[in-house]
Image (cartoon, rainbow, N blue to C red):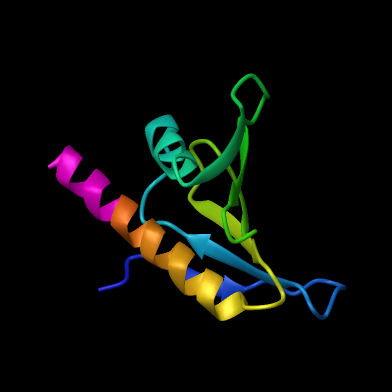
Amino acid sequence: MKRVECKKVENCFASTQMYEYRLPRKLTEEMICELGKNGKLTFHRNFPRPFFKLILADGTTVKGILHDTVVKAQYQDQKPQAGKQQFEDLLEELLNRQGKDTE
């Protein structure tokens, strides 16, 4: 069962494959660091709204804010569906692990 809501984000670039994911709980620093193990993580903890950017091996760019429930992912134009499925599986796996940790 999917616990993450997903919707395509419209912008002025027709070829951009950007999606917004609404999570069932707020992002914690632990969750961000766990996601970061899957790519190159830049985490600005000292910003007024701590922001992270993650670039996955396939070029997918993921952005979000600490303690927010929304994450945005921009997929590469060549194979957006493959990257999308891979990231969604990664998110579900993370949420499943986090759920077990909090039970």
Residue 89, x across and y down, in percent: 37, 65
Residue 25, x across and y down, in percent: 37, 49
Q: Can residue 4 be seen in this view?
A: no
- Check the image and name the residue furthest to the right: 12
Is 11 located above or below residue 87 in the figure?
below
- Check the image and name the residue furthest to the left: 103
Q: Report whether 42 appears left or right of 90.
A: right
Report the span colored magenta. Answer: 95-103
Q: Quadrant of the C terminus?
A: top left
Residue 8, x across and y down, in percent: 63, 75
Looking at the image, which residue is at 62% across and 60% down? 60
Q: Report whether 91 appears left or right of 56.
A: left
Look at the image and say whether residue 102 sits in the magenta stretch.
yes
Look at the image and say whether residue 2 sits in the magenta stretch.
no
Looking at the image, which residue is at 30% across and 57% down? 93
Is 1 located above or below residue 93 in the figure?
below
Looking at the image, which residue is at 32% across and 66% down? 3
